[in-house]
Image (cartoon, rainbow, N blue to C red):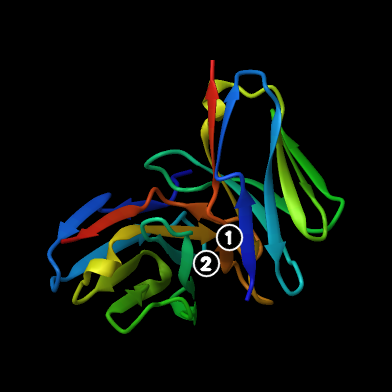
Amino acid sequence: EDQVTQSPEALRLQEGESSSLNCSYTVSGLRGLFWYRQDPGKGPEFLFTLYSAGEEKEKERLKATLTKKESFLHITAPKPEDSATYLCAVQEGEYGNKLVFGAGTILRVKS
Amino acid sequence: EAGVTQFPSHSVIEKGQTVTLRCDPISGHDNLYWYRRVMGKEIKFLLHFVKESKQDESGMPNNRFLAERTGGTYSTLKVQPAELEDSGVYFCASSQDLNSPLHFGNGTRLTVT
């Protein structure tokens, strides 16, 4: 059974203090790994898709990387508006977008 | 472009009652998914529609849950009769094709008392 484990569960940063979130996965044949951001009371908002080891994607202060066993979401010089829950998910099976989600990392950035 | 919309945003019902959740996907998105998050757990897949056909309903917990997508547009998820363990947030998502990222709605928070 596919599994996704995210760490840490929660992370508190000062504004400008860079850090990384981890997503380790166990899946038979990775088709795609997704990062989502979720704000309180909202649905997950798509950030990145990664398909193969060595791939990297960037968006503003966020950079996602992928290895054969894990993915990292690097946050450079975060701002308070980056505070959210960050979710990692992998596609399960050979078809469709049946996603297996991790529990998420709650990020708080203080000014 | 309007996003995925869900109604209602909150619902509080008593055990044994019936509740129907509605989801309007992004226009033109043939793929529609239902997910839910129960307290303290990860978001879990429930089922997947392609147009009006159920493609995968392996995540539906039991036969108290019935999902429909008549005409291939909006979808409903009915819970009848509701049990306490059905409480959680039900998310709907849609995508243009099978490998495009999912666009999620803001969810319906269901509380069964």
**What percent of the width, then of the height, locates residue B98?**
62, 67
Residue located at (82% from left, 54% from top): A67
Residue A89 at least partly seen: no
Residue located at (46% from left, 76% from top): B59
Q: Name the residue carrying label 1.
A: B96
**What percent of the width, then of the height, locates residue A36?**
58, 47
Q: Residue furthest right?
A: A54
Q: Crowdedness of circle 1 by 10 Å Cα count: few (<14), some, many (20+)?
A: some
Residue located at (70% from left, 67% from top): A26
Q: Which mark is residue B31?
A: 2
Drawn side of residue B110 relative to residue A20, left or right: left
Residue B47, compared with residue A103, is above or below; it is: below
Mark-to-mark CA distance, 2 and 1: 6 Å
Drawn side of residue B12 relative to residue A82, left or right: left
* Circle 1: residue type: Gln
In the foreground, B19 or A86: A86
Task: Say whether disc 2 or disc 1 marks the residue closer to the N-terminus.
Answer: 2
In the foreground, B24 or A13: A13
* Circle 2: residue type: Asn
**What percent of the width, then of the height, locates residue B79?**
25, 72
Q: Crowdedness of circle 2 by 10 Å Cα count: few (<14), some, many (20+)?
A: many
